[in-house]
Image (tube, coloured by chain):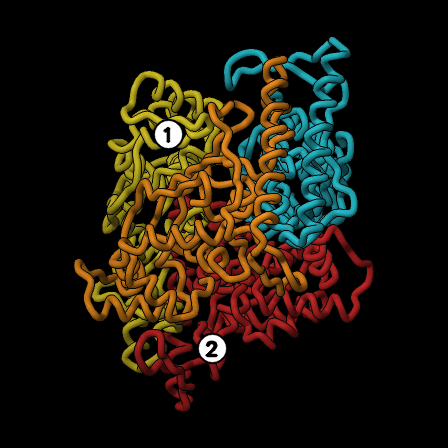
Chain colours: A red, B cyan, C orange, D yellow
Amino acid sequence: MLNSGSISLIDSMGDDLDIVNAAKVSFAASQSIMDDNGIGLIGFLMKNKHATPFEHVVFKFHVKCPIFVAREWFRHRWSSFNEMSMRYHVPENIDFYVPEDDAVRQQVGKPGHYTFTQIEDASEIAFVQEKMQDVYELAESAYSEMLELGIAKELARSVLPVGQYTEFIWTVNLRSLLNFISLRSHITAQEEIREYAIAVEDLIRGHVPITLQFFDETGREQI
Amino acid sequence: MLNSGSISLIDSMGDDLDIVNAAKVSFAASQSIMDDNGIGLIGFLMKNKHATPFEHVVFKFHVKCPIFVAREWFRHRWSSFNEMSMRYHVPENIDFYVPEDDAVRQQVGKPGHYTFTQIEDASEIAFVQEKMQDVYELAESAYSEMLELGIAKELARSVLPVGQYTEFIWTVNLRSLLNFISLRSHITAQEEIREYAIAVEDLIRGHVPITLQFFDETGREQI
Amino acid sequence: MLNSGSISLIDSMGDDLDIVNAAKVSFAASQSIMDDNGIGLIGFLMKNKHATPFEHVVFKFHVKCPIFVAREWFRHRWSSFNEMSMRYHVPENIDFYVPEDDAVRQQVGKPGHYTFTQIEDASEIAFVQEKMQDVYELAESAYSEMLELGIAKELARSVLPVGQYTEFIWTVNLRSLLNFISLRSHITAQEEIREYAIAVEDLIRGHVPITLQFFDETGREQI
Amino acid sequence: MLNSGSISLIDSMGDDLDIVNAAKVSFAASQSIMDDNGIGLIGFLMKNKHATPFEHVVFKFHVKCPIFVAREWFRHRWSSFNEMSMRYHVPENIDFYVPEDDAVRQQVGKPGHYTFTQIEDASEIAFVQEKMQDVYELAESAYSEMLELGIAKELARSVLPVGQYTEFIWTVNLRSLLNFISLRSHITAQEEIREYAIAVEDLIRGHVPITLQFFDETGREQI
């Protein structure tokens, strides 16, 4: 993910069948294998935004991403997070986000209606990447010098840019996760978080293929 | 549980080690087996109410309990519930709560400081149990007669007492679950929900024995 | 509301302008009076489901409704509730829900696709109302007799039907409230809670007229 | 607050009396003026951690603080936030956090048991402040140069340090707010957020003086 990021699915609970059975408790019923009725029921739930049965499937991820991506991620409140703490921890190597050539982009239009255009000029791309590197290097050396002086980590970190990679563990139920995917894989989301949202979707597909199929068919809306 | 209730743990994600690793992501660290440091860390988290690492362990239960118990249960908002619906479903047999002899009790004292005393007189116990049965029987027959007339289930149910058993699926993370246990196994909780809270605790003990040990040692407080 | 219910708006914080200003903090901006740009912004937020600005307007209600209505109400988790407790309190008069003549209805069709038809036959209507009254009366007298024996309130209440009126205070932000209205005023919601949802909407209209106008225009969907 | 920060209470709903009345709905009761019984009831609620009545009092703040402070703040999930967006907005002046002389501190001890010691040496203090300024200046000029090239704001911001001031609107109920104060005014919290937590407490004191008195008397614990 990006130049130094990653995402992995480290644990999960439940699959499509559990959604069916959460819904069927309405009728004090359950089934032990998926069948056409179960598939139809998931479609019905998704289409009518009966969202609670999707809350009984849970996923846990390990994520490494830039702070500016993490800041958007942590706005999702029906989620559990534990994150690397720069109050307690000094990473051995501090990684920073530098966009690949094709991610160096211009922004055109008004807020809410931006379009983004790739920069074509190789020297402009290099200029941007070098500017970023320059700031990151100065920030990292200033940070190190302050630490050498014994300055509190929590204070010294002030100079580290939001392009710094952080890492965290994220536990989330499928309902909240679909909302994350809906918002963060959307064309209006920032490209850097979109890559993660698309990866999240791929990582869970094997567990909830029927749910994701209906999610697509009904417009990938929040439920 | 009670005269017709039940609770079972039907799925779970994670154990004590996952709590340790959620906490250790603060230091970008992890470990693959539990050890004394891990045990000590869980104790530290519990004692200092660093609660978020406990959110990454999740349990799913099937519960059958009286409606008046379910109503207290559903007040726990950091939870996911799907419940049998009396708008959609007519149970083949409707079960109602009748207290065992030793649960027929008097209430003494002021709100917030009640004490409960078991009724000793066998005829008084029988009186209470029979009164309850009488109401339940009339309610059930009135309900059936209304259904025979084609009256909407959602309307006919109005007569069914809160002693009726309902059933639901409950998914909850360990932090929220410990709060449930703290409040609902407490001496001031109603006896009928206390039985369930104690059963919940027993059902998860095999998954998070270290957490529960420190939960006890630190006073079974909310975190 | 219904035969013995009520709902009143007892306090609130904010109005349409606060939604505009919550959104405009994105640009470190604000405005002191509503204008066409503000109206347009609310429309944009609603249409694009940018929901967080609606969370800064808050309402507080006092509600008296049947328990079966309250049970649906309390499923809305981004809400704060305090309710009359039958563990602590014995109401002087216990009120129960009996449907007006035109609310006595039949249910036709399959779950998820019910249609409801008013009962025409006056004797059938009376039969239903009397059946309900019979159960309520027996329940209330059994409850009283148990209390006279000193039986704990929390136990004696087991016989009281879900048609009993309860009362509660509900504090909720506008985003969560719109979701409540979307779901509970919907044609598929139970008629008894629909009446409350419609009343809620009328009670807040003076505070957020622009929001409610766009809520209608965009299909009254959850945001 | 700090060198360029601020916090103001911009709206609120309710006061101590509303807490009393939220609790008294348990008994279908209410009172119109505060009295000794009301005071005693708030004390009882706080002591016994009956927390829900505190949720019916709501506050709205405007906050300007460094990003590293905001990141801790936004971990409080039972809260509503809208924040200045660096995807949409380029501040006219970008402010950065530079600690006052007496906030330049060393960190001693192990994680969870840190103590902080003020730096005495004036040249070391100046060194830290200058190092920070150097990074901030380079970051700001690199940011400006990228913007001049038309680079997307959301991308160019990568270089801006977490010492940058952001601003946001925060709406929160009193229960969640007390948890914020408990955690963030605590001796183990970072000094920079502690200043805000203490300011929050002062800003609400006029609205809920009785609650804050009992909060202090019972150990400023989470409820």
The answer, for residue B23, to whether it is visible in the render is: no
Q: Position of residue D217 (x, y in %)?
A: 39, 21
Q: Secondary structure at mark 1?
A: helix
- Badge number at residue D21: 1
Q: In front of the other: label 1 or label 2?
A: 1
Against B92, is C222 above or below?
below
Whether discs 1 and 2 lie on one chain: the answer is: no
Side of B110 where A112 appears, left or right: left
- Identify the chain of the residue marked 1, using the numbered disc in the image: D
Q: Quadrant of residue C10?
A: top left
Tell me if I can see residue C18 in this picture: yes
Question: Percent from the top left, x then y, of residue B95?
Answer: 75, 37
**As rendered, which of A191 and B28 lies closer to the eye?**
A191
Residue sitting at the far left: C33
The label on residue A187 is 2
Q: Amino acid at mark 1?
A: Asn
Residue B113 as seen in the image, left or right of residue B148: left
Q: Quadrant of the C terminus of chain B?
A: top right
Q: Residue C218 shows which numbered tag?
A: none
